[in-house]
Image (cartoon, rainbow, N blue to C red):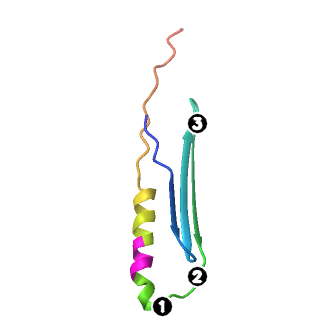
Amino acid sequence: ENLPKDANIPWEGHASFIAKSKADKQTVEMVRSLAEAFTYLDPKDYPSLRDFYQKAAAADQQQLILVRGQENSSK
């Protein structure tokens, strides 16, 4: 009934988070990718790091709502 919205959250030069969802009548496919390009950060980068992870977590916690279809009654 409801798929999570696709997300593309970049932190330029440091990391990116991408989430995509698609569905058809029989399957749901959800793909998430988190890429990090840093090992250590300066303390001055902490607010940006925190902001990135909060946005990524919010995008990753979107709900998928499934509705049971009507069963075939050809018994």
Q: Which mark is residue 38?
A: 2
In-image side of 54 versus 75 (left or right): left
Residue farthest toward the top in the current orientation of the protein: 75
Question: Is 56 in front, or is 26?
Answer: 56
Query: Which region of the structure is painted magenta?
Result: 47-51
Q: Which residue is at a point 58% across and 85% down the rendered structure image?
A: 39
- Label 2–label 3 contact, CB within 8 A: no
Residue beneath disc 3: 27
In-image side of 8 versus 57 (left or right): right
Q: Which residue is at a point 44% across and 71% down the rendered structure image?
A: 52
Q: Which mark is residue 42?
A: 1
Above or below, 7 relative to 70: below
N-terminal-most mark, 2 or 3: 3
Tag 1: amino acid: Asp
Above or below, 75 relative to 53: above
Q: Where is residue 26 in the image (x, y as percent from the top left)?
A: 58, 31
Q: Where is residue 54 in the image (x, y as percent from the top left)?
A: 39, 68
Q: Which residue is at a point 52% across and 15% down the rendered structure image?
A: 72
Instruction: Give the Cα separation between the discs numbered 2 and 1.
Output: 11 Å
